[in-house]
Amino acid sequence: MATLTELLTSKIPPHSLEAERAVLGAILLERESLPKAVEILKPADFYKEGHRKIFATMIGLFERSEPVDLLTLSEELRRSGELDEVGGPAALASLVEDAATAAHLLSYAAIVREKSLLREMIQIATEVVRQGYEAKEDVDTLLDQAEQQIFQLSERRMQGTAIQVRTILKETFEYIERLYERKEHVTGLATGFDRLDKLTSGLQSSDFILVAGRPSMGKAQPRDARVRTLTGWKRMGDLRLGDALASVDGRRSLVSGIFPQGPTQVYRVTFSDGRSTECTGDHLWRVHYRGWREPRVLTTDRVAQMLRAKRYQHWLWIDLPSGQYRHSEVLPVDPWLLGCLLGDGNLSGSSLRFSTSEQEMLERVLERAGHGFVLHAAGGYDWRIVQAAGAHREGVAGVTPNTVMNALRDLGLWRIRSEEKFIPDIYLNASGEARLNLLRGLLDTDGWVERWGSVRFCSASERLAQNVAELVRSLGGWCSVRSKETTYSYRGQRKAGRRAFVCNIHHFNPRSILQLSVKRSRALSAPHRRRRPVFVSIEPTRVIDTQCISVTHPSGLYITDDYIVTHNTAFALNIAKYAGIELKKKVLVLSLEMSREQVVQRLLCAEARVDSHRVRTGYLEPKDWPRLTNAAGRLAEAPIFVDDTAGLTVLEARAKARRMKAEHGLDLVLIDYIQLMRGRGSMENRQQEISEISRALKAMAKELRVPVVGLSQLSRAVETRPTREHRPQLSDLRECVTGETLVVLGDGRRLPIHELVGTAPEVLAVSTDGKIIPAKSEKIWRVGVRPVFSLRLASGRVIRATDRHRLLAARGWETVGDLSVGDRVAIARRLPESAFPESWPDLRLALLGQLIGDGSYLNHQPLRYTTSSEANSRIVAGAAREE
């Protein structure tokens, strides 16, 4: 029996050349057949390479509104140098001769598509088999990749028709009569935002509305502010694209954008438990208030203004993180045991000792110390942790070290007094479970539970107390630190003792942070009143360089100094919710950024008015369940449809919208967001692609007669204008290069782009198959001052561009901001000859080559040439005299 590899390699892939020829011939017979074919097929669906090129050329002619016939097709293929590759004029003529009729085009196209799908399935299956044998990825990743490839189908539909003015006038008067009868300010689709509806009269049919927001708006902090990553704290200014961050609920979160803001006034924001951070006035906070049904997103300036009113003082608070950061590292000492030793351990003697009167503690210490250790009584409540086999062993030279003592020594925790104790960074940055066990060890020793249920911790070390506060906050708790004076009696006299530092700890599950039975029994199962970080003060501090970041977490939240949660948000989904639930309008949400589950979760939380942070972390209150259940019922009845296909093209978006309109009806399309959409592959820069996407979305709105709302992000030019005028402009949607960047024109000339401002020249571009071809550019204009990146290749080539400028990389077109060190980018191996080449004599060319190789041309020095070849010296001397 043949093996799988032999079976896959010996078989000819499924195809039907007859059906492919029938499709191409039908299009040549009847040009109007092409839009029907585009709905079903793309060039890659054809098996024969020549047929692929013919169909791609047909689409190109159609997109330029040129006729698609035998003559234009032949000429276009000849101009691109592909005519001979497809078989020449005779092959094209045979397509027309063999085509009987265009009536059965859809049947022929269905056959071609079916064969293409079979080939794709075979290719994907082969790749899955190969990856399965190599086992370089985990099973979940392999399954995800396989599913993504198998179910990624593309549909293309484009059609339109011309209507006589008489018909349009009739429809217009009918529309005006309906408006007259209604007499309403909102004549379009209401958004649910009253002020916006009054300004726009609602979202009108056939309108393309761009909802543009500044990237990372509201997240500006000083470059020396700390941001919590998976492996520890990192300065804001040291963050890099792709850095993995700790998130509010433990889900994956990466830095997706970094945007310097320049010198800005910053403020110190302080909370009720002592934590604080610095940020700008327009920094966004997700703020709770006892009188609000749901949290609101407010700027620092707005919070400061509210704190001046007595009703808001001590009543505005923010979320707490969950503390579940998925990071693990091998720890030298068991976390609970380390907490126990930091609490009641003696780390300054010749042996490792700790004190306890609880038998349960003795058993747990012995268990956590590991095999090979025993406990020896050292008087009173003191115990030594020693090796069962002893330090001096038969047959072993020298002293066998105590591994726990060695680990403490490496951590800097040996031979230190009680007031010098601290928690090493490796433990503060450990996984959530490790940090929880460390806190349990500390509280099982030097912690206690008050009779009313509050948890306290006391230490003579201020550093350790602050570490405990950080530890509690990292686990989603609340902790304040205060100092107190201590006294003791000596020979009948009262004397002042060392200053002690007391941590007042509040946690949503108090019993979970204690393990000692006697203390757990005194702790509450749940606090009577949850302590939260309440805004206390907002004070200006300094003017300093600040920076924004964007993150991939669906909530836009990240964690900064003292585990303070900061926010970034949008409002477009509220429009979809209002239209679907309140107005019962058919809404299509094309989500390129979030999964459909994330979209629905946001809609559900917004409709139920339940804190989405509580939903994400699972800590729901009893009153939340009825709200969620009722909201789910209303949301289930709403005609809202969500499609989360990634990397959507405009043609695919149009096909999905047209299908929904035909099957269910359609009143609103929402796209989140257009920067993640793809244009045609022949676009050689992102500026042209954004223009094409915008035009196509407007055409889609007009064709479907529904409002299309596209979400977008603006460039950082908004933030860097010297006039401090931050109102967005259309040019802020563009991606740019610096003015001195050379552009290769179609005639071969190289000119700085700043010399081409105001023109739309023909330039050299990259075709879909990677060839350098001439193409007409769009109008070039200046957009002002923007932050730029300098991209340097190993060859020494350098280009300076904004973070959203696209370059052709190994994985396709990618933005500068998405590239990393080591990524490969494409360069042109050769360029077409200039239309106006300059002719040089042979001697001048020889002289230039020799001087480039062995010449010396320093400033303020004569030209010099050095060689050991007498023949070369004669050539250079002769050429120099002639030239």
Image (cartoon, grey):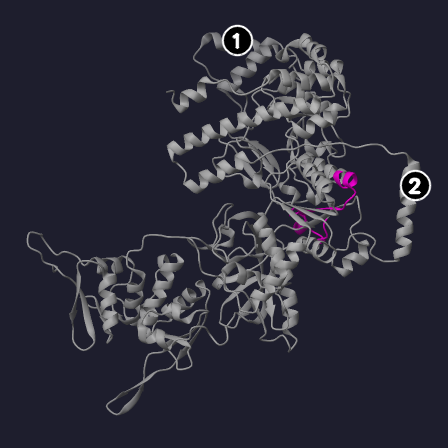
Could you tell whether 184 is left or right of 355 in the image? right
Determine whether 659 is above or below 796 in the image.
below
Nearest the eye: 875 or 181: 181
Q: Which range is magenta?
A: 700-728
The residue beneath circle 1 is 875
Return the x and y of residue 871 as percentages of the image width and height: 47, 7
Residue at position x 82%, y 56% in the image = 186
Residue at position x 34%, y 64% in the image = 438
Tell which residue pokes out farthest to the bottom in this image. 492
Nearest the eye: 318 or 184: 184
Q: Local crowd at mark 2 within 10 Å, few (<14), some, or many (≥20)?
A: few
Question: Is 724 part of what is drawn in magenta?
Answer: yes
* Label 1 residue SS: helix
Marks 2 and 1, how far apart in space? 82 Å
Location of the N terminus by quadrant is top left
Q: Which of pointers 2 and 1 lies earlier in the amino acid sequence?
A: 2
* Label 2 residue SS: helix
Residue at position x 88%, y 56% in the image = 182
Could you tell whether 361 is left or right of 589 in the image? left
